[in-house]
Amino acid sequence: MTLAQDPTARSAPDRHEVFGAHEGGKLATGLTAPLADERDLSIAYTPGVADVCRAIADDTSLAARYTWAHRLVAVVSDGTAVLGLGDIGPRASLPVMEGKSALFKSFAGLDSIPLVLDTTDVEEIVETLVRLRPTFGAVNLEDVAAPRCFELERRLVEALDCPVMHDDQHGTAVVLLAALDGACRVQDRSLADLRIVISGAGAAGIACARILLTAGASDVVLLDSRGVVDAGRGGEKAALAAVTNPRGVTGGVSLWVRQAAASSGSGLLTVGGL
């Protein structure tokens, strides 16, 4: 159907439109306090700001009230696993992180700043964010390659006294659980009665398996490029192998795709890469 046939349809943007929209970046800072005259300046900056600084120095908890840190999210990436693009590095990943910050503002009313770090060393990333902690109130990890993303998330949760979310894990898993729960309600079925096959056992697939098990699913099988994730696996997949695949099935990807498609009691969830 063409645009002429359906006026509500939208054509895909061309390269000129895309690059034009990104020129100069997609973010800018704004003001919440007016700066119209000398009095405004004396309140927002010198000398008035000194009173607020002294108060925070005496009681650091006041920073949550008198700065933007309590509503500022740091969107952090090293650019090693950008969706659909792979390891493109921090500079090339920045447009994606700007876009995520724009989503935070548009849909959640939260300010955020994209931070792309020119390192893939977990220790260096943790140290950087620990030192920047007074600036923000939460961390959203984005597009960090597995399995390093698991260690990075754990280390940051331990090191920071603020919420830490890995979008590729937690964001995907929350949306998946909500969708599957809704589908079960519509069909009057129980999550515990389903046989669930997750095709893709990277960061997103593993997180989806974990949240489904926590929510009551009893029969979850993960597949990666080597086939069913079983007890012989190591690393992050070893712990999941111990609580998934209760029937001890074996096989490769193609076999399980066919079986899932043929079984009315199963569902094949394609999550991320294999």
Image (cartoon, grey):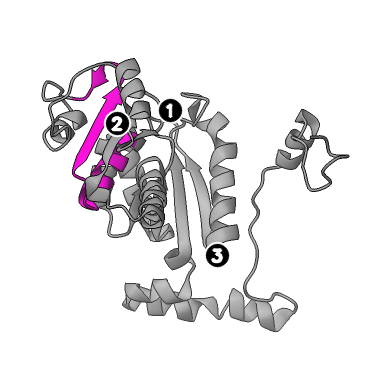
What's under tag 3, amino acid-wise?
Answer: Gly
x, y percent for residue 131: 34, 50
What's under tag 2, amino acid-wise?
Answer: Arg
The residue to which callout 1 is attached is 80
Q: Nearer the viewer, residue 57 or 66?
A: 66
Residue found 60% across the figure and 38% down from its top = 95
Residue found 13% across the figure and 30% down from its top = 247
How packed mark 2 is, by other alpha carbons closer than 10 Å (few <14, some 14-19, many 20 or more), is: few
Check disc 1 and report its element: helix, strand or loop: loop
The residue to which callout 2 is attached is 148
Check disc 3 and report its element: helix, strand or loop: loop
The residue to which callout 3 is attached is 109
The image quadrant of residue 135 is bottom left
The stretch of residues the image draws in magenta is 205-229
What's under tag 1, amino acid-wise?
Answer: Thr
Please say whether residue 220 is one of the residues in the magenta stretch. Answer: yes
Q: Nearer the viewer, residue 40 or 255?
A: 255
Quadrant where the C terminus sits is: top left
